[in-house]
């Protein structure tokens, strides 16, 4: 177990660091002036052994390692606080954390603007053929119809999940003159956009579907054959949420058979695997789970994670506790 | 001179068609049910001869042929109306048309939403590295900093030309949380964004410059060495207006030497020529003058051009006359 050996730093509170975390790497020196990190990656021990000997009360995590009873929590009886730098929480067994009295903090809204921007980036790129025409790859098609793309104004956009990201996507799209429809777990009384409890009905009434909801047991493969059929031949789908919300095999089939018009995908069902059929398609924009990755969001998330850890160790209220378990 | 030989159509008003016009090609059958087109492209005669024998009173044009006294107007003494399908009018000698009593109609606002959307497309693409990371071309850089891009919110955007397109760009950017600054021929009393009469000062205060003004003698090479220096190393420039507003040689030099951060270019100084240095750069997005090319704008422009021609031949007020000569 590697612990910083500088004697001045040995009095700093200990934080368990699980897995590679880019926010940690980018802000390592700033983090290390506040905390002493126990780094899983530096240890030759198998994970359960490493965890059991750490005696950690706080843990900083990313999204790569599942935080469940048998994988992690059983080996960390002293753990009281998990600080995740992710906005999505599908990798954490929140009910189990709650039962054990372990507080969890998330990235809160830190990525929301950037994820909303990225949804717009994919949507505009597809409608206006930016990636496919960039550097004039398709300058002249057989019919001379290169670049003949589609206007945003007037398009009906069905947003699935009108939370912190989805509502920001809606606000941006309104400025382009798009019409917003939405679905979510519950209708939002504060919102005047038409609400659809049925995803198929939302898809039928939308030109474009934008997925910005959490991955849960309820939303896994929510975008299935029926929804894609309802979206139809002219329809476009954007996913900046989680890959498994779409039945990816069906999506690939619909794209290959020309049964929907295009897709903008930042997430995939089994990342980093991307179905190879998609790479050859001009009506598909593929990004490697990059929606949240900006200089600014990483700085914000660093500040938030640091603030949460400082609050935990000084028994102050956490900055972004997860309460919706 | 080719004239449609269907006797029923011979009574239709005659319109001179100058050069290849995609809006005409797309809507040829609809156009041809209202007018009889005299097509320059079908004629073996040299242009001056062809024009002189056409006796045209109305002419439908694109942006490729300069409409000046010696090139065109001297050969068309009967001409009374020019309907251009372009929004930009830099190819027409408007003063000369005015002197000869020739009315000119433009595409008006028909392309404004699409051009504004395209400026956003280029801007988001550059800031969020969509084209450069699309299909994971740059998934892993040496420092592992692939995809680490920039947030839109909080960026200061200097818009040059706050007309029909520029004001739509501003509205969209506000929804992303950007701060708008602008310059234009005159300060707009109805607008609260900070106004800069000096372009260098605008560039100094902007993170990103967006060019959406007309090309005139005053704006040609307006973006020169001084302005690019003022924009600075972190600055980005977007041009969806006309290539010659930028001193392209200087722009290339600034990009090659890393003295500005990136460029999104839909227009070039000597189209279709594109400086070859630009093609190899990851911080440059290149599109082939495609901002205005959507199914929807072409339909709108067709309707507008048809409406203008019908109005001219029935002595009614033109729909989109150019008055600002």
Image (spheres, coloured by chain):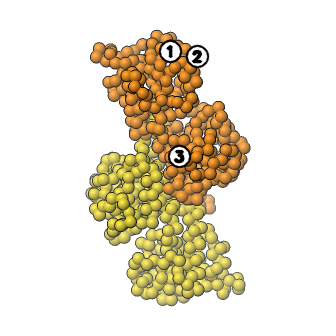
Chain colours: A yellow, B orange
Please name the residue shown 69% across and 44% down the image.
B198
Please name the residue shown 67% across and 44% down the image.
B197
- On screen, residue A177 above or below B306: below
Please name the residue shown 44% across and 16% down the image.
B56
- Separation of disc 2 and disc 1 at Cα? 10 Å
Residue A62 location (% of width, % of height) = 51, 72
Q: Which of disc 3 and disc 1 is earlier in sequence?
A: 1
Q: Residues within 10 Å of mark 3 (few under 14, many from 20)?
A: some
Q: Secondary structure at mark 3?
A: helix
Circle 1 or circle 3, nearest the eye: 3
- Separation of disc 1 and disc 3 at Cα? 38 Å
Residue A82 location (% of width, % of height) = 50, 80
Horizontal side, residue B69 vs residue B202: left or right: left
Per the image, the residue denoted by label 1 is B76
Per the image, the residue denoted by label 3 is B167
Per the image, the residue denoted by label 2 is B70
Q: Quadrant of residue B199?
A: top right
Q: Which of disc 1 and disc 2 is earlier in sequence?
A: 2
Q: Chain of mark 3?
A: B
- On screen, residue B199 above or below B9: below
């Amino acid at each position: 177990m590697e612990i910083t050996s500088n004697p001045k730093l040995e009095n700093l509170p200990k934080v368990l660091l699980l897995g590679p975390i880019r926010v940690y790497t980018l802000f390592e020196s700033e983090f290390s002036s506040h905390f002493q990190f126990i780094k899983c990656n530096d240890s030759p021990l198998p994970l359960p052994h490493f965890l059991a000997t750490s005696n950690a009360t706080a843990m900083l995590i990313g999204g790569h390692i599942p935080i469940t009873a048998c994988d992690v929590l059983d080996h960390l009886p002293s753990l009281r606080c998990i600080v995740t730098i992710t906005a999505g929480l599908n990798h954490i067994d929140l009910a189990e954390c709650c039962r054990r009295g372990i507080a969890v903090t998330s990235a809160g809204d830190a990525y929301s603007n950037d994820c909303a921007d990225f949804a717009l980036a994919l949507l505009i790129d597809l409608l206006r053929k930016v990636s496919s025409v960039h550097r004039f790859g398709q300058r002249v098609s057989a019919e001379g119809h290169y670049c003949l793309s589609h206007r945003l104004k007037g398009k009906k956009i069905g947003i699935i999940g009108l939370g912190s990201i989805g509502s920001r996507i809606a606000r941006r799209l309104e400025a382009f003159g798009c019409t917003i429809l939405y679905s979510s777990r519950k209708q939002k009384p504060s919102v005047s956009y038409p609400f659809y409890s049925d995803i198929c009905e939302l898809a039928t009434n939308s030109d474009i579907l934008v997925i910005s909801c959490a991955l849960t047991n309820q939303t896994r493969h929510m975008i299935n054959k029926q929804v894609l059929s309802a979206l139809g031949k002219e329809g476009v789908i954007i996913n900046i949420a989680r890959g498994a919300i779409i039945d990816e095999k069906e999506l690939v089939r619909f794209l290959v058979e020309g049964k929907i018009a295009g897709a903008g995908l930042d997430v995939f069902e089994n990342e980093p695997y991307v179905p190879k059929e998609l790479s050859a398609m001009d009506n598909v924009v593929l990004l490697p789970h990059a929606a949240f990755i900006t200089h600014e969001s990483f700085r914000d998330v660093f500040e938030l994670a640091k603030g949460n850890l400082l609050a935990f160790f000084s028994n102050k209220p956490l900055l972004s506790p997860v309460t919706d378990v």
